[in-house]
Image (spheres, helix red, strand yellow):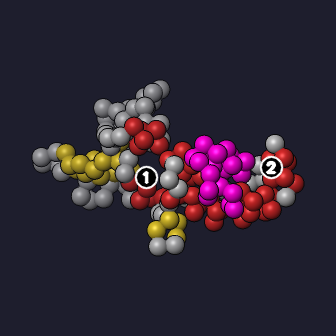
Amino acid sequence: MALADMRRREPAAARMLIEAKASGEPAEVRLALIELMRFGLNAEDAPFLKSLATDRSGKVQDLAGRLLARLGEHGHSSEGGAEDPAVELAVFIGEGKSGFIRRRTTYTPAKLKSRRRKSAAPNCSRPAIWSTSPDGSASRNPNSSEPGSSAPTTTLIS
């Protein structure tokens, strides 16, 4: 584990060595090398970790994304900039309409289609449904009250 010790003492030099060595190695070796990046992780590591978003191995991509998340960065880049987190989270929210006379827009957790999306989704154990009416007011659906709450409906006026 000489490389791990080097990463702890001289993170920049170890990163340069990992960058040079990782590209020609099989996926499991690349994964082990990238795991060493967690020692002494800093903002200077972000460009290399972002470059791993296009790696051949999904495991390497996921690990690089987790390390970038620890740095407060995003693993996906579009046109050279970080992807907007709101767009990324919008995938997990479904929009619908309800009511015939009092028309409302409802927001519910979206049904996730793939196992990968399910594992990346925030914990949505109970559906929290919010409705917005055409006048701009928002209210919580009375059928989905929070545990321990005596008043099941909350209305927000924007």
| Left or right of 80, for residue 150 | left
In the rendered structure, which amino acid carries the disc numbered 1?
Answer: Leu
Q: Vertically, is 135 above or below 60?
A: below
Tell me where residue 72 sits by quadrant.
Answer: bottom right
> Residue drawn 65% across and 55% down?
22
Residue 140, percent across and down? Answer: 35, 42
Mark 1 → mark 2, Cα distance in angstroms: 37 Å
The x, y position of residue 122, in whole percent, is 47, 41
Where's residue 95, x and y in %? 28, 50
The numbered dot on residue 89 is 1
Q: Nearer the viewer, residue 100 or 114?
A: 114
Is 98 located above or below residue 15 in the figure?
above
Please give the range of residues in magenta.
19-37
**Residue 38 seen anywhere in this rendered image of the structure:** no
Amino acid type at circle 2 is Leu
Task: Read off the residue under disc 2.
Answer: 3
